[in-house]
Image (cartoon, rainbow, N blue to C red):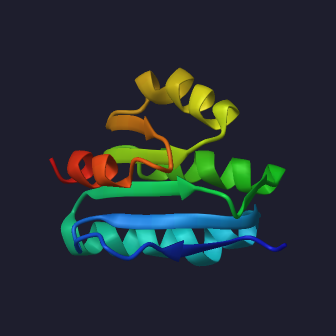
Amino acid sequence: MKGHFRRLPGFPDTVLAVTATGKIDSDAYEQELMPMVEEQIAKTGKVRLVYMLGDGFEGFTAGAAWDDARLGLLHIRDFERIAIVTDADWIAMGVKLFAPLIPADVQVFETDDLDDVKSWINA
């Protein structure tokens, strides 16, 4: 299934909360996620991002992986907090490996921990 990003309900306007579904490709990053990030920066100056990779997430294409890195580099100082929400061990391990290189607070949560995500992202 073609991948998409959609906003998650239940978060304040100061937080960009998205979920990824399907197989995320370069188009999903360029047409959906990047504009949402840039809109959030324009609105609040910094991005507090909740990025959920739940049951409907099927993976990334190589182009999406490149766009993810490009998004991070283009906006490296624009992220204040990043909550990655996933039950996939390979994603959690990758995030923990690269988190020290990101100049923002980064935390990994399991999908059952949405209350903890909301508390942490708003702290």
What quarter of the picture does the N terminus occupy? bottom right
**Where 54 sits versus 85, above or below?**
below
Please state if 107 lies on the left or on the right of 69 as rendered: left
Question: Would residue 20 be seen by someone viewing this image from the given angle?
Answer: yes
Q: Is residue 111 left or right of residue 50?
A: right
Labels in figure, total = 0
Residue drawn at x 33%, y 49% is: 117
Question: Which residue is found at the position 57% from the left and 33% from the top?
Answer: 92
Instruction: Estimate the x, y position of residue 59 in percent, counting from the top left.
Output: 77, 53
**72 or 112: which is nearer to us?**
112
Q: Is residue 78 visible?
A: no
Q: Is residue 90 above or below residue 60?
A: above
Determine whether 60 is above or below 120 in the image. Answer: below
- Which of the pair 33/93 is nearer the observer? 93
| Spot occupied by residue 35 in the image (x, y as percentages of width and height) | 49, 75
The residue shown at (30%, 53%) is: 115
- Which residue is at 55% across, 21% downward? 97
Given residues 34 and 85, the one toward you in this image is 85
**Residue 28 lies in what quarter of the image?**
bottom right
Residue 32 at x, y = what percent? 58, 76
Residue 20's x, y, as percent? Answer: 62, 64
Front residue of 93 and 30 = 93
Classify residue 91 as left or right of residue 39.
right
